[in-house]
Image (spheres, rainbow, N blue to C red):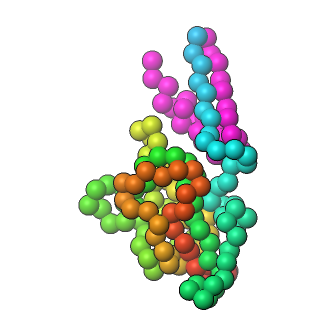
Amino acid sequence: MCYIDTVKELISLTNTYNLVEIEIHQDMTRIRIKKNGAGRLISNQDCRDAMPCVSTEEFPTESCVITSPMVGTFYRALSPGSKPFIDIGSEVNSEKVVGVIETMKIINEVSAGVTGRVVEVFVEDGEAVEFGQPLFRVQQTHT
């Protein structure tokens, strides 16, 4: 029996409600989703709190790091040979998809969570990423 939709819904619930672990039992089936890492789940929307914005000579205005919300394989484009979602110099807003992470054959979109311009890329297409690993640095613009 296939439980892909159930697993997708549980992953969505853990992300929506910042859960570290969720488990369900139905008849003889048990599904448990447990996030890697300890403590509070850090979403990209919490970027300013999780990775404090910094001001340095290299980046004269505030910048923020977009981090991986999960473990998996990061892709900068939707398919091989396609144009990347973003590059250095791309303008992003909080909803802008910056890449996707494949985990257990499920493709998860990663959104910027901040508004600004991409100034640095930390990962390559097809690279394995860990929870909280830096993906991009964004020079923030205030709206």
Residue 98 position (above or below residue 139): above
Q: Is residue 130 in the magenta section?
A: no
User: Which quarter of the rendered picture does the C terminus lie within?
Assistant: bottom right
State the quadrant of the N terminus. top left
Q: Is residue 95 visible?
A: no
Residue 26 percent coordinates (x, y): 62, 16
Report whether residue 106 is seen.
yes
| Horizontal relation, residue 17 to residue 123: left or right | right
Label total for image = 0
Residue 38 to residue 77: above or below: above
Q: Identify the residue shown where x is 45% and y is 80%.
A: 89
The part of the chain drawn in magenta is 1-27
Residue at image position (65%, 23%) is: 24
Q: Is residue 25 above or below residue 6?
A: above
- Position of 76 with respect to 68 (left or right) is left
Image spot of residue 115 (x, y percent): 60, 74
Q: Is residue 75 above or below residue 17?
A: below
Residue at the image position 37 percent from the left and 65 percent from the top:
84
Q: Nearer the viewer, residue 132 or 76?
A: 132
Residue plotted at (65% across, 55% down) = 43
Residue 5 is one of the magenta-drawn residues: yes
Residue 23 position, x and y percent, is 66, 27
The percent position of residue 66, horizontal first and vertical second, equals 57, 64
Quadrant of the rendered image containing residue 126: bottom left
